[in-house]
C-alpha cells in the first residue's frame, strides 16, 4: 500500500522545499544547476560507485535488489543503479525547473503541462525503462508541491496550524485511501484515479506526521532522525540486504511484520551511526555534503 504513494510523496517534499527555499532566490538558471550538481551529483556518483562495488562482491552471498557488473560504472550518467535513481531523476527535475520553472508564473505553466504528461503515462511511456517512465510521471507532484511551497512563504505565520480543517482533511484522505487500498481498487484504476489516490495517500501521511509532531517526544525523535536523513537514504539498502538474508534463514516461512520492524530499526540506527562518525571528520563528511567544503572555501576566499 505504501508503495502506491511513497515516491510521489518524496518528490513532493523535494518540490515543496524548492518552492519554499529556492524559487525566490534564483538569479540565473546556471546557479541552481551548479549548486545541485555539487550537492546531489557528487554524492550520486560516489555512492553509486560504492553500491556497484558492494553488489558485485556481495550478491553471491546475500540477497540484493540489483544485479550489477563493471558495465554499470560506465553508464551511470544515464543508467542509475539501486535507490540512487531518485537522485538522478531529481537532478533532471532541477535542470528543468532552472530554465523552465524559475519563476512562479512559469512554474504554474510547467505544472499544467506535467499534469497532462502524467495523465498520458500509460500511453506515452509504456516502452520506456522504469527510470525514465518515473521521471516523466512524477514531475507533476514535484512541480505542484513547489507551487504550494512558494505560496507558503507568503504566509505571515509559517507555523502549520493544527485545526479542525487539518483533522478533517486527514480523516477524509486517510479513510478514502484506506478504503481503495483495502479493496485493491488501485490495481485496476485509470491513471487519473491513480493520481488522486497518490495525492490522498501523500496528504494523509503528511498530515498524520504533522499531527504526531504535536507530541513533544515524537517531534524530538523525528527531528533527530531528520538530522541523519541523507545518510539513511544513501546507506539503508546496505543494511537491509543483510537483514533480509539473515531473517529468511532464521524464519524460512517469512514474517513480513518482523522483517519490516527489524529492517527499519537496523537500517535507521546503522545509518545514524555512520552519520555520527562522519560528522566528526570534515574530510569524510564532504563525501555526503560536498557543498559544505565549497562553502568553506568561498568564506576563506580560496575560490
Image (cartoon, rainbow, N blue to C red):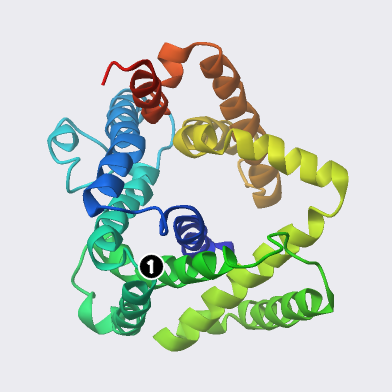
Q: Residues within 10 Å of mark 1 (few under 14, many from 20)?
A: many
x and y, in percent, of residue 57 in the image:
31, 23
Q: Is residue 251 left or right of residue 217?
A: left
x and y, in percent, of residue 275 in the image:
56, 23
User: Which quadrant of the rendered structure holds the C terminus?
Assistant: top left
Q: Residue at x 61, y 21 (%)?
A: 273
Q: Residue at x 30, y 48 (%)?
A: 32
Helix, strand or loop for disc 1: loop
- In this view, the residue in front, 202 or 216, is 216
x and y, in percent, of residue 82 in the image:
35, 43
- In this view, the residue in front, 64 or 43, is 43
Q: Quadrant of residue 169?
A: bottom right
Q: How many marks?
A: 1
Q: Is residue 99 above or below residue 230?
A: below
Q: Is residue 223 above or below residue 130?
A: above
Q: Residue at x 39, y 21 (%)?
A: 299
Q: Quadrant of residue 202?
A: bottom right
Q: Is residue 66 visible?
A: no
Q: Quadrant of residue 114?
A: bottom left
Q: Is residue 293 above or below residue 11?
A: above
Q: Is residue 50 left or right of residue 12?
A: left
Q: Is residue 145 left or right of residue 61?
A: right
x and y, in percent, of residue 231 in the image:
51, 32
Q: Which residue is mark 1?
A: 138
User: Which quadrant of the rendered structure holds the N terminus?
Assistant: bottom right
Q: Residue at x 65, y 51 (%)?
A: 256
Q: Is residue 70 visible?
A: yes
- In this view, the residue in front, 56 or 248, is 56
- In this view, the residue in front, 173 or 186, is 173
Amino acid at each position: 500500500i505504501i508503495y502506491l504513494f511513497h515516491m510521489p510523496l518524496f518528490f513532493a517534499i523535494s518540490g515543496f522545499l524548492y518552492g519554499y527555499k529556492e524559487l525566490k532566490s534564483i538569479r540565473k538558471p546556471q546557479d541552481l544547476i551548479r549548486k545541485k550538481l555539487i550537492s546531489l551529483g557528487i554524492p550520486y556518483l560516489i555512492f553509486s560507485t560504492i553500491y556497484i562495488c558492494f553488489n558485485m562482491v556481495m550478491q553471491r552471498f546475500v540477497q540484493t535488489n540489483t544485479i550489477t557488473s563493471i558495465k554499470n560504472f560506465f553508464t551511470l550518467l544515464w543508467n542509475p543503479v539501486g535507490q540512487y535513481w531518485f537522485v538522478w531523476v531529481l537532478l533532471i527535475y532541477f535542470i528543468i525547473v532552472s530554465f523552465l520553472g524559475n519563476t512562479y508564473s512559469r512554474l504554474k505553466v510547467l505544472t499544467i503541462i506535467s499534469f497532462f504528461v502524467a495523465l498520458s503515462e500509460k500511453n506515452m511511456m509504456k516502452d520506456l525503462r522504469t527510470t525514465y517512465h518515473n521521471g516523466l510521471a512524477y514531475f507533476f507532484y514535484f512541480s505542484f508541491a513547489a507551487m504550494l511551497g512558494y505560496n507558503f512563504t507568503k504566509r505571515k505565520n509559517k507555523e502549520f496550524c493544527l485545526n479542525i480543517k487539518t483533522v478533517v482533511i486527514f480523516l477524509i484522505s486517510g479513510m478514502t485511501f484506506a478504503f481503495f487500498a483495502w479493496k485493491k481498487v488501485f490495481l485496476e484504476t485509470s491513471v487519473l484515479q491513480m493520481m488522486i489516490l497518490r495525492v490522498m495517500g501523500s496528504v494523509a501521511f503528511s498530515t498524520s506526521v504533522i499531527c504526531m509532531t504535536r507530541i513533544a517526544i515524537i517531534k524530538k525523535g523525528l527531528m533527530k532522525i531528520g538530522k541523519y536523513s541523507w545518510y539513511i537514504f544513501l546507506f539503508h539498502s546496505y543494511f537491509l540486504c543483510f537483514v533480509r538474508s539473515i531473517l529468511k534463514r532464521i524464519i524460512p516461512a517469512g514474517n513480513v511484520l518482523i522483517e519490516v520492524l527489524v529492517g527499519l530499526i537496523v537500517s535507521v540506527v546503522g545509518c545514524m551511526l555512520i552519520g555520527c562518525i562522519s560528522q566528526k571528520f570534515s574530510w569524510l563528511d564532504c563525501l555526503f555534503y560536498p557543498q559544505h567544503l565549497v562553502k568553506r572555501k568561498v568564506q576563506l576566499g580560496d575560490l
